[in-house]
Image (tube, coloured by chain):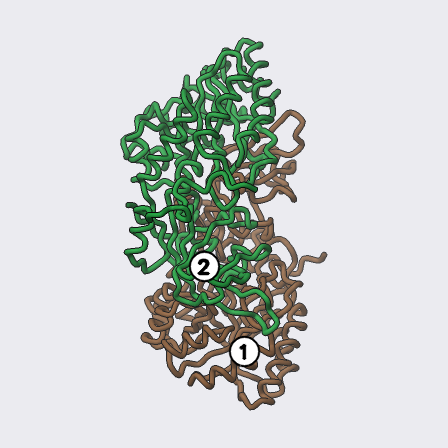
Chain colours: A brown, B green
Amino acid sequence: MTMQHQGAFAPFSSAMPSSLDAFIASHTFDRPTVVLDTSRVRAQYHRLKAGLGRAHIHYAVKANPEPKVIAALVAEGSGFDAASRGEIELCLAQGAHPSLISFGNTVKRASDIAYAHSVGVRLFAADSAAELQKIADHAPHAQVYIRLLVDVSEADWPLSRKFGCDGPMALELLTFARVLGLEPVGLSFHVGSQTRRAEMWAAPLEAISKTWHAAQAQGHNLSLLNIGGGFPAFYGEAIEAPTAYAANVMAQIDTLFETPPRVMAEPGRGLVAESGVIVAEVLLVSQKSAQDTARWVYLDIGRFSGLAETEGEAIRYQLETAKDGGALGPCILAGPSCDSADVMYEKRPVMLPLNLVAGDRVLIRNTGAYTTTYSSVGFNGFPPLAVCVI
Amino acid sequence: MTMQHQGAFAPFSSAMPSSLDAFIASHTFDRPTVVLDTSRVRAQYHRLKAGLGRAHIHYAVKANPEPKVIAALVAEGSGFDAASRGEIELCLAQGAHPSLISFGNTVKRASDIAYAHSVGVRLFAADSAAELQKIADHAPHAQVYIRLLVDVSEADWPLSRKFGCDGPMALELLTFARVLGLEPVGLSFHVGSQTRRAEMWAAPLEAISKTWHAAQAQGHNLSLLNIGGGFPAFYGEAIEAPTAYAANVMAQIDTLFETPPRVMAEPGRGLVAESGVIVAEVLLVSQKSAQDTARWVYLDIGRFSGLAETEGEAIRYQLETAKDGGALGPCILAGPSCDSADVMYEKRPVMLPLNLVAGDRVLIRNTGAYTTTYSSVGFNGFPPLAVCVI
């Protein structure tokens, strides 16, 4: 496979180290730390925006709720997709206007809906009659969009059936929303996390457009298409460059929808993952028996302290050590806790230097998304992943 | 299957509600909360101790590091199995004597070993030459035990190969420990979490005894057998009562070891799980299409806020609602986050009342172990699982 894109700041091809790499090289960290570079977040925002054109970006806050990341995106004019009252409060505290915040979780606590309404949030997601009823009760006259289930089998991490409803139910919910005094403005969907190529959007977009057109035929006068997230980050497998990828998705939308709708996009991973590097340390290199061919390498970070997305070996992070370039051997990579499930890569071992030893630093690339907040409060007595913003 | 044991305080069979149930019934909680009853912890300690006899209990702190739980066990004379510097500090702060704390993680940060040594911890686990070297460097002359790999396929949650080494390597490590000036005192193993019947210990104990006898034949003069954890809690499937279970394990040890060794046991789950109840709330009940036979029930707690052990649907917690007793239907149970992996039970749906609606309280039984500290710091903007100790 040809490497089309190695991430915006792939260090391998740089003659000069990036400011992020230079910062890490010149600092020590006494525990696992993700170092975030907000200039990378801003640069990636502009790359995505260049491709998305008229679409408005609503950053998926859950990917990384670091206040300085939010503040940087507020300054760029980004909107926000919030999953909870806590995320809405965070965005407001960083200066986001409530009109630029959508409450995108289809499962909301009633009191959180009331809170959102009280601070001026006007756009809510739903995929069920019960949720619409809650919204009508606690945020009367709000705008709502209905989330659709789509077949997302091509994504690296397909989303389950947890969110969304089928097309016929969506049509019923649009009508029900109107009965409740809400303003049903559109539809949303999610192609699946880490959808690596823009062409993978074709089938989901085609399916959504059918429900969209059926709704219009029923007189719903929809205006908003929320295309969700799914924009990929570089984890070692080729992905398209962000601007071309986003432009391709928008071109598909323009083909499928006669009257181009207002478009919202909710990148999370694709916006912030490549702005972060975790600095970790090897705690132990060992073997289980004299016959073992693979070594066990234990880091000071694991599935319960920041690397939750290695569950099922789904996301394969790129590792870097100061000893790269010499001879490599297969390693099972595990975390520091006494939990036997705290193993990152075992079915597909990783190749690491043969001379790796306890105390060696390991950089884990492109870990700016879905690391910090997955971290446990203190499993096994280890503190949560530390954050350092440059 | 005959129900042999429903947990020490199974509410189903009680004429009078327990003090824990009475407390929960008379209080409201504004977010998911685990309510812990330390009197249950103390009672379970005595049940286990009654069966374990001469063996000394070292509570596996990672199961629940709530300070009041630690303090209650200190008062009972318990020892502690610590996974990290943080857990050692916690135990000392609650009054534990350092001689009653073992540093049981086979993967330790060098500086944490030095810390443990400095505060008087004298007993350390290892399963590799590199770890022994670290211990010798930072805790000279310490006592060490070598952890063995065992075949644990009968446990509900078999531990992986992450911890332990094979028998031949263990013998080499005992010799190497002596070369390093350490005092190799024994062997440890783990039968696997939630080993429901005492007879499942037979094969692992038999395997351990072979290595033990080989070590004695080589002149190692071992004195300590650390039998680890694995003591079960009630999650709906029959388990043996704790005293009989522990006594059975000890009887097996007495048969296999000619000179009865000093025995350490490290119950975690089996000691504290049944002392806690999570009070949660239904956020939404919905269906994905008119054809769906199962409902989706979304709680305000999920895999990333306390129910991590539902991964792979491994631990099946018992749920209780105020509407129990009426008609039931199959439900997929999911958490509140926008994460599609945040689904607790889908392959094997749970039966819940047909009239369950948003706002209803759900009690999740026997959740005193491995819930609080697995909780994420703030995934999706939700606060960590709250703790209330009575």
Q: Residues within 10 Å of mark 1 (few under 14, many from 20)?
A: many
User: Residue B387 at x, y = what percent?
Assistant: 33, 49
Q: Secondary structure at mark 1?
A: strand
The Cα atoms of the two marked residues, 2 and 1, are separated by 39 Å
What residue is rendered at 58% in x and 37% in y? B160
What residue is rendered at 65% in x and 58% in y? A238
Q: Is residue B282 above or below residue A351?
A: below
Which residue appears farthest toward the right when viewing the image?
A: A1
Q: Quadrant of the C terminus of chain A?
A: bottom left
- Tell us which disc is closer to us: 2 or 1: 2
Residue designated by label 2: B325
User: Residue B316 at x, y = what percent?
Assistant: 51, 49
Evaluate if marks 2 and 1 touch, with contact meaning CB atoms under 8 Å apart.
no
Q: Which is nearer the eye, B37 or A282?
A: B37
Q: Residues within 10 Å of mark 2 (few under 14, many from 20)?
A: few
Q: Quadrant of residue B287?
A: bottom right
- Residue A187 got which mark? 1
- Looking at the rendered structure, the kind of residue marked 1 is Leu
Q: Is residue B153 left or right of residue A267?
A: right
- Looking at the rendered structure, the kind of residue marked 2 is Gly
Q: Is residue A69 left or right of residue A330?
A: left
Chain under numbered label 1: A
